[in-house]
Amino acid sequence: MVVAFNVTGDEQGDWAVLSVSGELDLVTSPVLRQHVHDVVAEGQHSLVLDLSEVYFCDSSGVGVLIASRRLIRSCQGELRLILPEQGAAEGSHVNRVLGALGVRRLFEVHPDLDSATDDEAKPLSA
């Protein structure tokens, strides 16, 4: 079975949104890294990464998420992730991996796009 990896861009108010689907691994993580760099190069420093359709994430994928956070913060920007609200209970592999590595607390995580782009919404707890 061949699994397609896809990153699509959109805007929601002041936020750039990258929706990611498929496996985030050694082969595909450079693609996401480039998309993040492109968004920042275009002058957008408020970024939402929608990872709700990512069903596998390895250490290189986590590395891209951490590097993206560092890049956005260096521009005084903000990075938010979208993961299913129930996280590991619902089978969010990314949430489980971030939690197991102890880096989940580094990210502001929201359950959906409306919450992630609402400055009044509270993120999910780590």
Image (spheres, helix red, strand yellow):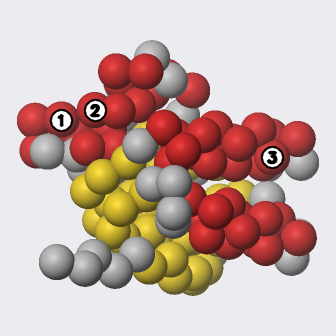
The reply to whether discs 2 and 1 touch (Cβ–Cβ < 8 Å) is yes
How many neighbours does mark 2 have within 10 angstroms: few (below 14), some (14-19), or many (20 or more)? some
Give residue 11's quadrant in the image. bottom right
Residue 17 seen in the figure:
yes
Give the secondary structure at mark 1.
Answer: helix
Which quadrant: the C terminus?
top left
90 left or right, relative to 5: left
Which residue has dot 2 on it?
96
Give the secondary structure at mark 2.
Answer: helix
54 left or right, relative to 91: right
Mark with earlier residue (3, 1): 3
The reply to whether discs 3 and 1 touch (Cβ–Cβ < 8 Å) is no
Which residue has dot 3 on it?
71
Amino acid type assigned to the residue bearing label 1 in the image: Ala
Mark with earlier residue (2, 1): 1
Give the secondary structure at mark 3.
Answer: helix
Check residue 88 in the rendering and tell me which mark sits there, or answer none. Answer: 1
